[in-house]
Image (cartoon, helix red, strand yellow):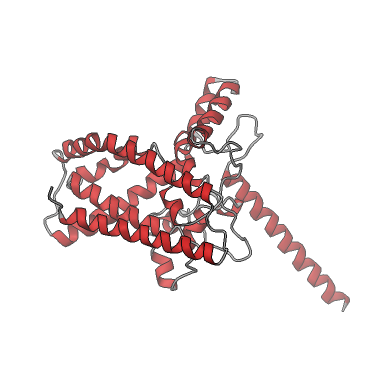
Amino acid sequence: MKFTGSDISVGGLFGFVIILTLVEMYFSYLHDKKIYTKRDTWTNIYLMAVAVVINLGMKTATFFLLEYCYQFRLFQISNIWIYWVVLILAQDFLYWFLHTVGHYVRFFWAMHVTHHSSEHFNLTTGFRSTVFEPLYRVFFYLPLAFMGFTALDILFAYLVTQIYGNLVHTQAVGKLHPWFEYIFVTPSHHRVHHASNVRYLDKNMGMVLILWDRWFGTFQEELPQDVIKYGLTTQPKDTGPINIIFHEFIALKNDIKKAPTLIAKVKYILNPPGWSHDGSTKVAKVMQQELRDAENLKDSETVQSENQQLKQA
């Protein structure tokens, strides 16, 4: 069996991530930081294994669909440097779009939620895969084939950016240089993404570049006064191997069942998580607006109190 340069590169990068994970795990236990727990780590590995099996099952279909669409490419970039720069940028943007859909459409959230279900945050959290994503991910990347990028190159670019995405799942790195924080996704940005704090919900969707979030209104900086709590706003009580994958589908089915009209049933599927026909639950944007209103009111009251104290003095 011959290995290509791409195989060696991806294998080397993946091996690097594994080594870093073991180092982070060792120092976590050595200094009793409690960043890792055995049950959580095994759950991450289990979800990764399920995703790998589905990925392997979809690999051939994904490749041939991309290759088929490549026949209808609209243009071809001949310069190799421009080719790869455009491919990485376009792929990263389409990932941002895929990821955003996973947070704002409840049907896709039901699949993506497994990645956010851990109350811990470490390098193995990056392996806590959206197990069913391989079933639909290719449809978000079809524009790349129409743009003249081959199936192999698209898949290679995805693997490389995915490895970068795994590396930002860590608490061991604080904020980096401001210029790097402004352009690229960093551990600080991704800690926000995995938080269940109201302020942080549905923020920082990027894989490599944080610019998409800055430009399209999904960016949120990590704030020292709002200490991150990892996990979901409502954690599943049963974290067994089956329920950890299907618990949101079960909740979605129950909500659809109680919806009074067909339109309400469809809205439960297509609207953001938290939407309800009777207003009993709220979407993240509504909760965040309420948080801003409460903070503005508190600031206003503080200013009024300070002014009153100055007048009395």
Q: Quadrant of residue 57?
A: top left
Q: Quadrant of residue 31?
A: bottom right
84 or 313, nearer to the observer: 84
Where is residue 19 drawn, in percent x and y? 36, 61
Where is residue 29 drawn, in percent x and y? 53, 62
**Residue 185 in view:** no
Q: Is residue 124 above or below residue 184?
A: above
**Residue 189 in view:** yes
Q: Quadrant of residue 238?
A: top right
Q: Residue, x 13% and y 47% (percent of image)? A: 1
32 or 91, nearer to the observer: 32
User: In the rendered view of the protein, which quadrant contains the C terminus?
Assistant: bottom right
Taking the image as shown, residue 283 lies to the left or right of residue 269, namely right
Q: Residue furthest right?
A: 312
Taking the image as shown, residue 180 lies to the left or right of residue 114, namely left
Where is residue 43 drawn, in percent x and y? 48, 44
Q: Residue furthest bottom?
A: 313
Q: Residue, x 39% and y 44% (percent of image)? A: 48
Where is residue 47 drawn, in percent x and y? 43, 42
Q: Residue, x 52% and y 20% (percent of image)? A: 262
Give the number of marks.
0
91 or 308, nearer to the observer: 91
